Amino acid sequence: MTLPRVGVVLDFGAATPMSILAAARGLCEVVFLCDRCLPYVARLVDEIAELGEVCDVTGLSGDALCAGLGLGGLTTFAEAQIRRTAELAAPEGFAYLRPPAAEAVTDKYLQRGLLAAAGLPVTRCRTVSEPAELAPALAAVGLPAVLKPRTGAGSARTCRVDSVAEAEARLREFRAGPAPFAFVVEEYLRGDLSVAGTGFGDYVSVESVSVAGTVRHVEVTGKFPLAPPFRERGYVVPSTLSAWWRQAVLDVASDALRALGVADGVTHVEVKLTPDGPRVIEVNGRLGGYVADLVRRARRVDLIRLALAAAAGRSVDIPEHDYRRCAFQYFLTAPMEATALRRLDGVERLSRQAGIRHVEVFRRAGDRLDWRQGTLGYLGIVHGSAADHDEVLRLLAMIDRTLTIGVE
């Protein structure tokens, strides 16, 4: 049996090359399209070439990227490569986001307009590029508001603002970074902490796979309360939502995907749990970061494999919910005011505790810290599992007691 060949436009994202190759076994042959101008790719391309097929597309554009590869599908797991992948997939008729949909899932301002036009609850939003534009924008949106880049991921350069003066100062600060950004200010959605319950966040995400316009929801991922200002603290599968709330969240996610014209591919829709019902925070046209590991551990469903199947135009088989355990990831974050890590003690002791599967550490003493990096500014991730959600909370408390984090 000849397996279809699926191209993966590679960059830093929600799946590593090794996890993609593992998920593809018996399903498809993976061809990594690698642009050495991308720092993530440049570091790994030689290593990847020893493990799988690589097509060096550095300096190429348009049809030349896919010429002669015999591909039957194309996808990416990287936010930064969604539009490029859509432009390559469209002429070939591959099962991926159409270019207008790719633009919609990567442009927060355009996305808000399309959701409102489709009749979803309106979240007021305005674009800003200069501090002088903030006063009229905030008058239209209202205070408090959220200031964030028009494109991007991981809550980088994202914060709440409670006055025009604060917004102006933050915008100047954010624009002083290494690259220019367009920003939006949007209505601050107030969550209902009672929906998910004590110890859990007031938002969730919906992981879905679409093939030829048919949306299949795979999972509703629970969250832990955010670290200030909007940095994620981790996820849990299954979520703690009641049956009513779960269905309401799935319904609003379906409405959002239709509004944006998403017909093919994997999506990650973030939904706020508000006193007035679920509200869409944003729609992402890719696999959610770290979600695949949780879903696989909790119920033996491989989201990366489903993404590859969808790219190949195959129907996807999603098993009924049969959770073995509550799987969680707990992100280790520093206070907003931290500028450098002095110490992170207790990791080895924590690794030996029951319920803790693995502790990843990304920072060492002396490393600079900056909350503006968003979620990816974390110190590490604790991976674990528990019999139920109460035990999850007990393990989180144990993690906090065991680890000592010192910062400047």
Image (spheres, helix red, strand yellow):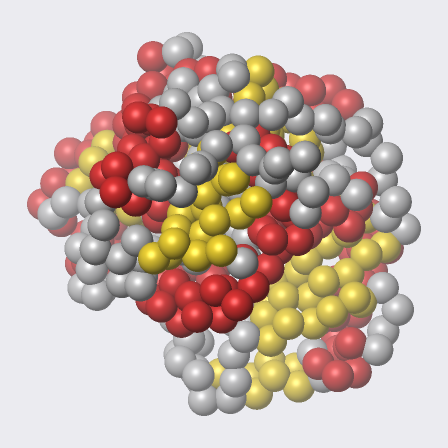
Foreground of the two, 231 or 259: 259
Q: Is any atom of residue 401 visible in this view?
A: yes
Answer with left or right where residue 35 lies relative to residue 322.
left
Residue 244 position, x and y percent, is 73, 20
Tell me the residue at 30%/26% (across/down): 91
As drawn, 107 above or below 405: above
Residue 149 position, x and y percent, is 29, 47
Foreground of the two, 183 or 284: 284
As drawn, 39 above or below 351: above
**How many numbered discs sit on the rendered protein?**
0
Q: Is any atom of residue 83 visible in this view?
A: no
Tell me the residue at 36%/31% (across/down): 89
In the rendered view of the protein, which quadrant contains the N terminus? Answer: top right
Tell me the residue at 81%/56% (across/down): 385
Residue 155 position, x and y percent, is 42, 51
Answer with left or right where residue 389 lies relative to residue 185.
right
Figure quadrant of residue 398: bottom right
Foreground of the two, 313 or 148: 313
Figure quadrant of residue 38: bottom left
Tell me the residue at 68%/31% (across/down): 218
In the rendered view of the protein, which quadrant contains the C terminus? Answer: bottom left
Answer with left or right where residue 324 lies relative to residue 250.
right
Foreground of the two, 16 or 282: 16
Residue 173 position, x and y percent, is 22, 62
